[in-house]
């Protein structure tokens, strides 16, 4: 059987990315132009700035991805693009580039869900075994997804308020750490101790949902009360205690879901999967368990286009193409 070569495009947030992937597993190129530096001084992603940067970067990023992959347009079977969820103006840049290329080069177009991409990032390094449980933890998502087959996603738990990464970014801001806050808190945690007992939102018995807004408020209150009493709190201890609270809930709910659904494999995806504490805690919890835990390397945890090409490969094989009137959908469901 001939190889399947897919060009992936991702512009849902603050990375302009393009990648060429062979057979859904072999990364031929993976180009990511990050805008983090431009958003840093605003303390978060500014949608309008993100869109403008995507427009400036997309052509160059696409050219580089094709060049580095050492393929010709003839070799490329289809173009896969993130259609949602994400920032609408940012998504539109990728969607329009993909549509223009699909039309000009006469290739099928494939719309991909961003979270499906995060899940499939794992397959670039490690073949899936079903049933599979995916913990998706990013700036916009905190979800537990059960997969019994390729590209079939059953949502078994999700956040009721803030996403895990969002909680990290907000707490980092309270501690006056630069954006993005996740890596900063992760680094600071290692220097402190989890001496403060922040709440852990277990929710109802048996629920796999998450909630981080109570924890965020607890951190605010702690800082506020200390300030009023003239006490000094060690930022590293706050970071460490906050991180421990997040990690405990993510690890335990993932473990319980893996037991209940008797999965063969557990994978972790999204930017927060880069968190050292979370990686360690999951490894400890699943040591000796029947389910294989797999956590991808950090460059595959954060936004990239190889993951979109990898997910798009399955849709290509199933001939699930998208019409050229594809639109960006900022609140696309999985
Ligand atoms: O998946 P991603 O790159 O973009 C989204 O789709 O949201 O995730 C970005 C999020 C940010 O909230 C960032 O603070 C968080 O992932 N993050 C981390 C770490 N690295 C990135 N959170 C905790 N620890 C980290 N090491
Ligand atoms: Zn993402």
Image (tube, rainbow, N blue to C red):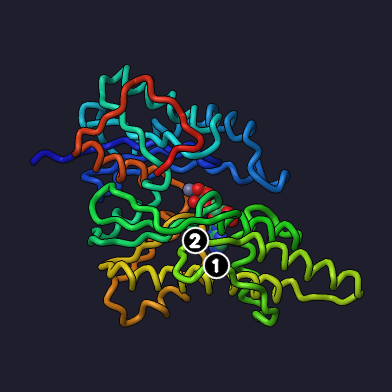
Report which quarter residue 221 is drawn in.
bottom right
Q: Look at mark 1 in the image and give the residue it sits on.
A: 203
Q: Secondary structure at mark 1?
A: loop
Name which quarter of the figure residue 217 lies in: bottom right
Q: How many marks?
A: 2
- Residue 80 x %, y %: 33, 34
What's the CA distance linking mark 1 and mark 2? Answer: 7 Å
What is the number of the mark on residue 9?
Answer: none
Circle 2: element type: loop
> Is mark 1 in CB contact (under 8 Å) with mark 2?
yes
Vertical comparison of 254 with 128: above or below: below
Q: Which mark is residue 209?
A: 2
What residue is rendered at 47% in x and 32% in y? Answer: 329
Would residue 16 be visible to someone looking at this image? no
Q: Earlier in the sequence, mark 1 or mark 2?
A: 1
Please tell me which residue is depicted at 48% across the width and 39% down the height of the picture: 85
Instruction: Return the residue found at the far front.
Output: 204
Q: Nearer the viewer, residue 302 or 263?
A: 263
Instruction: Answer with the quadrant where ligand 1 appears in the image.
Output: bottom right
Q: Residues within 10 Å of mark 2 (few under 14, many from 20)?
A: many
């Amino acid at each position: 059987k001939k190889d399947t070569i897919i060009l992936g495009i991702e512009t849902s947030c603050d990375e302009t990315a393009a990648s060429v992937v062979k057979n859904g597993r072999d990364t031929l190129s993976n180009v990511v132009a990050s805008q983090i530096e431009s958003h840093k001084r605003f303390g978060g992603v500014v949608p309008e700035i993100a869109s403008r940067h995507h427009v400036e970067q997309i052509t160059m990023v696409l050219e580089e991805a094709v060049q580095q992959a050492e393929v010709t347009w003839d070799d490329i079977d289809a173009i896969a693009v993130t259609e949602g969820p994400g920032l609408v103006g940012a998504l539109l840049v990728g969607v329009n580039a993909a549509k223009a290329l699909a039309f000009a080069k006469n290739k099928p177009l494939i719309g991909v869900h961003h979270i499906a991409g995060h899940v499939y990032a794992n397959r670039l390094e490690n073949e899936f075994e079903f049933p599979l449980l995916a913990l998706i933890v990013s700036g916009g998502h905190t979800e537990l997804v059960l997969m019994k087959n390729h590209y079939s996603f059953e949502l078994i738990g999700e956040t009721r308020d803030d996403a895990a990464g969002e909680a990290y970014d907000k707490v980092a801001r309270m501690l006056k750490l630069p954006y993005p806050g996740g890596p900063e808190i992760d680094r600071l945690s290692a220097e402190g101790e989890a001496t403060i007992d922040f709440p852990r939102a277990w929710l109802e018995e048996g629920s796999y949902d998450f909630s981080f807004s109570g924890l965020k408020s607890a951190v605010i209150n702690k800082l506020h009360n200390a300030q009023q009493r003239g006490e000094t709190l060690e930022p590293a201890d706050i970071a460490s205690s906050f991180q421990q609270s997040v990690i405990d809930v993510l690890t335990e709910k993932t473990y319980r879901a893996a037991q209940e659904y008797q999965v063969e494999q557990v994978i972790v995806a999204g930017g927060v999967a880069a968190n050292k504490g979370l990686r360690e805690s999951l490894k400890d919890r699943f040591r000796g368990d029947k389910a294989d835990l797999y956590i991808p390397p950090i460059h595959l945890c954060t936004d990239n286009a190889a993951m979109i090409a990898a997910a798009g490969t399955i849709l290509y094989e199933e001939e699930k193409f998208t019409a050229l009137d594809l639109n960006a959908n900022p609140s696309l469901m999985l």
